[in-house]
Image (cartoon, helix red, strand yellow):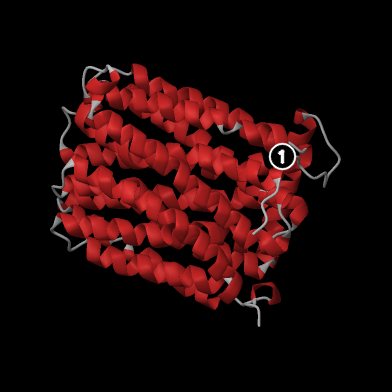
Amino acid sequence: MQINRPILAWALYDWANSVFAVIVLTTFFPLFFRDFWASELGSAETTFYLGSANALASLVIVLAAPILGAIADQGALKKRLLILSAGIGIAATAGFFWVPRGEWLPAVALFIVSTICWMSANVFYDALLLDVSDESRFDEVSAFGFALGYLGSGLVFAGCIWLTLHPQRFGLADATAAVQISFLVTALWWALFTLPLLLVVRERARHRKQALAAAAVSGYRQLTATFAEIRKLRPVLLFLAAYWLYIDGVDTIIRMAVDYGKAIGFDSTGLIKAVLITQFVAFPAALFFGWLGQRIGSRNAILIGITAYALMTLWAARMTQSWEFYALAIGIGLFQGGIQSLSRAYYARIIPADKAAEFFGFYNMLGKFAAIFGPMLVGTVGMVSGDARLGLLSLLILFIAGGGLLWLQPTSEKEEPPA
């Protein structure tokens, strides 16, 4: 695969922002929230607040993403809105450093703001795939971005783990101070590796550039037209319905796995090691899925990943030993990046190129709308039943329903594997 400067600069944003996903969304924030900011709350209550915070952040993106995407398309603003969203998210992430023990409400507020900005920046980042790559290379380029993201976040995560295990070697008082420093490191890494995209990537002019206010008016008008257009584009509509379901399960497992492991009795050190394993396994696995999508078609490769996730959910709901959590971490690493990268590439193929940000706004809207339901489902079922395993098991229906709809998706000529 040939990597030119625009593709590399675009993919380095995945290298930059994936650190937020692993440090804040997946590991350090859930653990620190439970043990430091919300230590006086009960276990079920903590899970409920964490799930609610994820759900609220996702709700904002559900409402805003399509409108932001339409504005970005009409005003050629994808890159500028990405930088604005990332900048606010970076500042909020750095803010975790100054939240004292027991102050769970300010921690939740910063978490919601930083997560909203991280997700909104991804709307514009995903849409820029069409500006840096030709359609024939979407699978490989999308997978390359995810692979760099897993590698970069894995390296930073490994460094932060080392920092928390040996804080005195770095002149820190204890592991608490090391975790707080890790939030600062996350913000700095995100900021530093956003610069290549800012300096190198150029948007292709598909509309006449407009001022922000005019773009907002045009974007709103275009949004209403796109709602009607999507209903007529059966492949897009069917794929979005399938994606809404199966990515709900994937995103919920990403966000709630550490809290689930903690709730059923696994220690924090083991959970962190498991997440680190996932990051490094996912790096080559994402590249492999990019190749696999080229060979057997994106849809078929995604279906393989969905099936694997359903089986792993069944296993996770029954596991009792620490080695099982590590085995599941390897399994998630093998399929997580593949599902995400090939979904993005498949969708990029079936949408109009001149409305990329707007259509990706719907794509991210549905993904994040799913993320409202999934975390709330896990948290609420776990709190009502008193059984975290039952909450996790409830995600199985999402993989079955999403995979079934994707199976019904007609295979276009673009999706036929090469002879």
Q: Residue furthest front?
A: 169
Residue at the outermost bottom position = 419
Q: Quadrant of the N terminus?
A: bottom right
Residue designated by label 1? 201
Image position of 96 (left or right of 407):
left
Numbered-mark total = 1
Vertical comparison of 237 with 165: above or below: below
Secondary structure at numbered mark 1: loop
The answer to whether residue 56 is visible is no
Q: Amino acid at mark 1?
A: Val
Residue 39 higher or lower than 245, as above or below: above
> Above or below — where is 155 with respect to 189?
below
> Of residues 67 and 338, which is closer to you in this image?
338
**Res 86 visible:** yes
Viewer-proximal residue, 262 or 329?
A: 329
Residue 229 drawn at (x, y percent): 72, 60
Q: Is residue 77 left or right of residue 241?
A: right
Question: Which residue is rendered at x = 45% and y = 53% of the image?
Answer: 283
Name the quadrant of the C terminus: bottom right
Residue at position x 34%, y 68% in the image:
310
- Point 38% across, 56% down: residue: 281
The percent position of residue 28, horizontal first and vertical second, equals 31, 35
For the residue carrying disc 1, how many other residues have a C-alpha within 10 Å: few (<14), some (14-19), or many (20+)?
some
Q: Position of residue 44 (x, y in %)?
A: 19, 42
Q: Position of residue 139 (x, y in %)?
A: 61, 62
Among the 4 quarters of the image, the one containing residue 47: top left
Q: Seen in the image, is 394 located left or right of residue 349?
A: left
* Viewer-nearest residue: 129 or 154: 154
Give the residue displayed 65% in from the left and 78% down from the top.
Answer: 418
